[in-house]
Image (cartoon, rainbow, N blue to C red):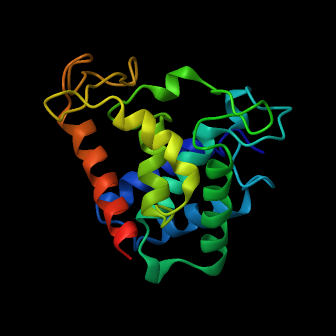
Amino acid sequence: IKESEMTCLTGNVCASLIRMGNAGDRRVRRALEWLTEVQNPDGGWLCPYWKAHLRDTHGCFMGTITPLDAFAGYPERLRTPKMKEAMDHGAEFLLMHRLYKADHHGLEVINKSWLKLGFPCFFYDVLRGLDVVTRLGYGGDDRIKDALGVVLGKQRGDGKWVLESTPSGRMQVDLETKGEPSKWVTLKVLKVMKRLEQFNSC
């Protein structure tokens, strides 16, 4: 794989371009098609250009969440069968890990930083995992319950959620203050909860 082939960055850029109304651009489509071509056999994606996964065979959560975020926002009418297959396979990769646990090590927490809720979404955390899998249509899967419990357990008495993490060093300025109630984190949690209500009402 060439160093220019950046799976997690490609996913983040595509997700942003789609949110800005560029889903119909052929370059976005080509990038998404490329992501289906380089998907790992286990359903995840790898980020070998960081030189952290050069010998790995197991998918990377950061490399996986960003393509899925992009696919979740891509209009259904534009999705190819191969994209849908990649989405399902990628969602299963996250779900088999309960969104944050090691599937082969007693379901231990893989990375404690993933339990911190952040904004903007540059890296991986359990809330981003919940947001993406529910947007992909997996809100009825029991394997999201542990991650949902983590998120709901962080709600304050006033009904809000606190900003616990920011992509420090990658932004000119933080949009909100860490340790303070976050309108963006709270909004994302409420969107997830609304989707789950819709799944449960079906």
Kindly identify the residue that appears in the image at 37 percent across and 60 percent down: 196
**Taking 170 as reference, is 26 above or below it?**
below
Kindly identify the residue that appears in the image at 30 percent across and 45 percent down: 189
- Quarter of the image for the C terminus: give it: bottom left
Residue 94 image point, x, y percent:
62, 48
Q: Is residue 165 left or right of residue 130?
A: left
Q: Furthest-left residue in view? A: 158
**Taking 59 as reference, is 172 above or below it?**
above
Q: Furthest-bottom residue in view? A: 77
Q: Is residue 64 left or right of residue 182?
A: right
Residue 10 image point, x, y percent:
54, 49
Residue 27 image point, x, y percent:
49, 65
**Taking 171 as reference, is 98 above or below it?**
below
Q: Is residue 42 left or right of residue 185?
A: right
Residue 10 in view (yes/no)? no
Residue 97 falls in which quadrant of the image? top right
Residue 26 in view (yes/no)? yes
Kindly identify the residue that appears in the image at 64 percent across and 35 percent down: 101
Residue nearest the viewer, comparing 21 with 44: 44
Residue 52 image point, x, y percent:
73, 26
**Taking 65 as reference, is 101 above or below it?**
above
Residue 134 falls in which quadrant of the image? bottom left
- Quarter of the image for the N terminus: give it: top right
Residue nearest the viewer, comparing 56 with 104: 104
